Amino acid sequence: MSGTGVARAEHAWDRTIRLWDAYFAVAWAATLAFVLNAAHPGFTVRAAAAALLVPLVPWYGVVGRPLLQEDPPDQGRAVRYLAGAIALFLPSAVLVGETRLMAFALIPQCFMTLHMRWSLVAVTVINLVPVGGWALLWRPSGEDLFANVLFSAVTLVFSLVIGGWIIRIIEQSMERADLIAELDASRHEISRLSTAHGALTERERMAREIHDTLAQGFTSLLMLIQAVEAELDDDLPQARRHLALMDETARQNLAEARALVAGAAPADLDGTSLPDALRRLAARHEAVLDVIGPVRPLPAGPEVVALRSCQEALANARKHAGSSATVGIALTYAPDKLTVSVRDDGCGFDPGTPCDGYGLAGLRARAGEVGGIARVDSTPGDGTTVTVSLPVTPERSS
């Protein structure tokens, strides 16, 4: 249990045991008063019976009270405690019939500390043995004997009914305590799993962002370096142009890294529209962009997915189709859908062939997060087309 739950349960039980202390004290004092003021037998016998009741108080305080506070009570100690209490109670109850009032303090303790079978035995002894011993010792009249037997029988039935109710309450309380403990443990487990899932989701998100931004940028830089090395001796103007692209790509990577750290929107979309961001991206990858349909502002989610998907598709095209392949980008604005398509005329591949890597799986996962779909169409020798379709809010007619 949590600390708050434990403190609350202990406080409630402390109040309950004080009530039982008060109940025991009232029952004991009333029994003592009835015994000392009884009409029969003589004072000496009544004083002896009262003296037998006195040890019940320290016996309860030292042994019984701590036992009642245990959850559940130790059965061995419970048997010893009640055996001692009954041993003190029975002689007094046999000597003076009024002592049987003390049974109302002892019977609840039987049900609170013993299992059902043993509690029934103890209650039966407490109710019937005193009447039998009293009848054998004092030989009462038939009328007195009938009244005492009837009183004991009623007390026994009442004890069994109330005791059964107490047992059911105790069992129900224990079941509820177990249920609360299970719920508390489940809550902590759910919290732990939620935290772990959140951390995993965040790692996956960061992996996608790094793969689609920084990793692709570094890949572009490596390809540009290779191109510059090949052009330095034969085509200096082209080498300078590629060096300028390297500078722009490096700056863009730095901006993307800062955006990732700050949790901001992609650097390409900062203060600009999606078509403008794709034009700059297409220029860096020497691709051609075609915008279809009326351009309009869209929520950040679809625009970010469209940009990242285009980055991934362009990087794959340059990686697998080669730098000499022609790459085209189509951005289509429909009333209820935004579609970005990247087409290259490279060597293509078989989409059914399992492939390692994070790119296509991450692309599909990213599209699925906003309710979209990603499709890859390719044929060996006939190029590849990556299409991402994202749902957007339909335009309202004026």
Image: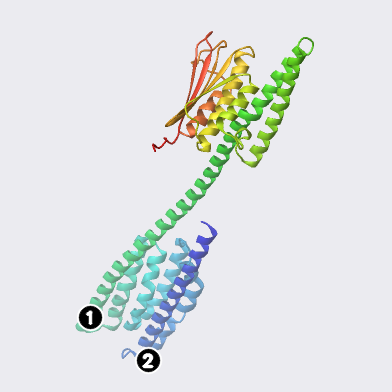
Q: Residue at x 33, y 83 (%)?
A: 98
Per the image, label 1 sits on a secondary structure element best described as: helix
Residue 117 picture location, percent across and down: 34, 60
Can you give x and y, in whole percent of width and height, for residue 198 in the image? Answer: 55, 41
Colour scheme shown: rainbow
In the foreground, 392 or 64: 392
Quarter where residue 39 is shown? bottom left
User: Which quadrant, please, contains the C terminus?
Assistant: top left
Q: Quadrant of residue 26?
A: bottom left
Q: Amino acid at mark 2?
A: Phe
**Which residue was labeled with disc 2?**
43
Say if residue 358 shows up in the picture.
Answer: no
Upstream in the sequence, badge 2 or badge 1?
2
The relative height of residue 233 versus residue 80 in the rendered view (above or below) is above
Residue 71 position, x and y percent, is 47, 61
Judging by the rendered image, the residue that carries numbered circle 1 is: 147
Q: Nearer the viewer, mark 2 or mark 1?
A: 1
Where disc 2 sits, the SS reads helix
Disc 2 to disc 1, C-alpha distance: 23 Å
| Camera sees residue 299 | yes
Left or right side of 248 for 168? left
**Which residue in the rendered view is the most extreme toward the top?**
381
The residue located at (76%, 19%) in the rendering is 240
Front residue of this view, candidates 294 and 244: 294
> Do labels 2 and 1 touch, CB within 8 Å?
no
